[in-house]
Image (tube, rainbow, N blue to C red):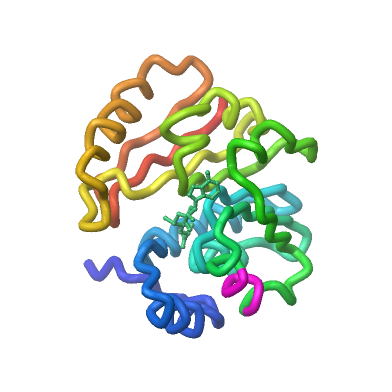
Amino acid sequence: MDDSPYFRPAALDDILMDAAELGFTLSCEDRTGSLLATLAASKPGGHLAELGTGVGAGAAWLLHGMRPDAHLISAETDTVRQAIAAKHLGHDPRVAFETVDADTWLDTYSGPPLALAYVDCRPGKFHRLDDLLDLLEPGGLYVVDDLLPQPTWPSDHQPRVAGFLAQLPARANLVGAVVTWASGLFVGVRT
Ligand SMILES: C[S@@+](CC[C@H](N)C(=O)[O-])C[C@H]1O[C@@H](n2cnc3c(N)ncnc32)[C@H](O)[C@@H]1O
């Protein structure tokens, strides 16, 4: 079985070229992206969020799947990285790139309940998961990646991931699956 994606966002290759030029190696991998697109397609009219834009690879996949009436907010602290995302994807009226710390974003988001959150930085994943889940609508999807050891991890990161995985079963408002595929995923649903 070839599990490589059979579709690809139009802007992705240009985004990845800019990422290489910048030396940015943290973009989501293609298989993860294809899952993001698939899940995004299941949320017509939905309000989606990505915490940690990077250079926009994840956003490109999400937008590829999103229906015309869906919306995406993508939050990032690094202006140089996010500028690349905005250069390639900013023309799309469905996406808003916000230069903001995810902690602040969690404190201040006042929009509609989220249909999907792809959390790719520490707030909303390794801490403040409760606050993130509170923003999801019932049935809202919670997606994280990079749960299998990555060459880019700092030396103290494994215990953080182990702690994240260990506390999932105790959560009363989240049903999900830990998936040993791509970079290691958790796909959950807010109940
Ligand atoms: C793994 S990369 C994101 C990759 C992107 N989501 C993708 O799928 O291609 C993580 C990003 O989160 C950003 N970041 C780290 N801490 C953050 C925070 N507290 N708030 C917002 N962004 C943060 C980093 O600057 C980095 O660009």
Instruction: Point out residue 144 in the picture as x, y percentages from the top left corner.
Output: 43, 44
| The quadrant where residue 187 appears | top left
Q: Give the vertical position of 34 relative to 157 (above or below).
A: below
Q: Give the vertical position of 131 relative to 76 (above or below).
A: above
| The quadrant where residue 157 appears | top left
Which residue is rendered at x = 57% and y = 44% of the image? 117
- Quadrant of image for the N terminus: bottom left
- Is residue 37 in view? no
Q: Give the vertical position of 131 relative to 93 (above or below).
A: above
80 within the magenta span: no
* Left or right relative to 84: residue 137: right
Instruction: Point out residue 145 in the picture as x, y percentages from the top left corner.
Output: 38, 48
As rendered, which of 134 and 123 lies closer to the eye? 123
Which residue is rendered at x = 59% and y = 71% of the image? 85
Q: Give the vertical position of 165 relative to 87 (above or below).
A: above
Which residue is rendered at x = 36% and y = 35% of the image? 177
As rendered, which of 49 and 175 lies closer to the eye? 49
As rendered, which of 30 and 100 lies closer to the eye? 100
Which residues are the magenta region? 83-87
Which residue is rendered at x = 29% and y = 44% of the image? 147
* Left or right relative to 14: residue 138: right
Which SS type dominates the magenta stretch? helix
- Is residue 137 in view? yes
Instruction: Point out residue 99 in the picture as x, y percentages from the top left corner.
Output: 66, 55
Instruction: Point out residue 98 in the picture as x, y percentages from the top left corner.
Output: 69, 55
* Left or right relative to 146: residue 134: right
